Image (cartoon, grey):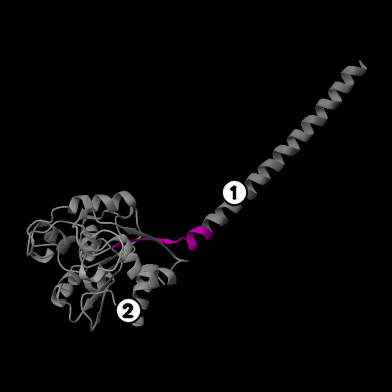
Amino acid sequence: SLSLSLFLSLSLSYMRVAATGRVASLSAMTMNSNDTANENKKMTSTKKRRVCALHGRGGSANSFSNFLQKIVEETEDTVEWTFLDGPIDEGKMHKFTGNANGKALAWWVLPANTRTYSAEVLDGIEMSCERVTREGPFDCLIGFSQGATLSSVLCARKCGCDEERKQFESVVLVSGARPGVGKEWERVQKEARFGAKKSLHVIGETDAINPKALGFELAECFGGEEFGSEIVTHERGHIVPIDEERIVKKIIETLTGS
């Protein structure tokens, strides 16, 4: 009888503790849930944008990262940078990257004495788009020369960005030109403006590789101010004008959304 009473007493005490523990546990779960929600909200508000950087013909991820070092350093708190190599090894260095370490790469192969803007077919474009898509999704793009042209194709194809949104937050095209005269150009003309919320086109007044008229032509495909497109020019040629504060500031604003 005494043992039975003791057993019942201990059982009731355990049940009270268990019940109290359950309530405490629910409270902790609620608090943890709120804390997690707040933390997620904080992380969302401070999330770094993923930016994919695409070099020009004859360059490389390494050479382009050297070019953009100033911008990378100024955005390290807000941008997660990815510099990609083109899949085509040309076996020689472009004059602008002759002192850089690494291979001379491209995003597609061109026939002899042919520029991208006059090519019928861009042999290698599929591999290049697949490479960007595989490494993505990205929030933004910045491309120079052939990399800028590739950026326009990525916008038109809606690839490399978030699969649900089907749109980049922003893109920066430096010294770009149309992607040939075939189907890719037709697609860019029709679709590029829908592939990015905002675009910045950096055009050199004395660009002898991709003349400025071609830069303006490509910029038109992004729909003008109505589609968040902006053009900035500089007096120099086929280069990223990294020493011009006005343009550097504009590039950073476009990529970070600030």
Specify the quadrant of the image occupied by residue 237. Answer: bottom left
Q: Give the magenta part as a residue range.
A: 42-54
Q: Is residue 44 visible?
A: yes
Note whether residue 168 is visible: no
Q: x, y percentage for residue 126?
A: 19, 50
Around disc 1, counting alpha carbons within 10 Å, would you say few (fewer than 14), some (14 to 19), or many (20 or more)? few
The amino acid beneath tag 1 is Ser
Residue bearing mark 1? 33
Q: Dot 2 corresponds to which residue?
A: 247
Q: CA distance from mark 1 to mark 2?
A: 44 Å
Write the residue at 13% across / 53% down: 123
- Specify the amino acid type for callout 2: Ile
Q: Nearer the viewer, residue 236 or 105?
A: 105
Check if residue 130 falls in the magenta segment: no
Q: Residue furthest right?
A: 2
Q: Left or right: 32 with respect to 55?
A: right
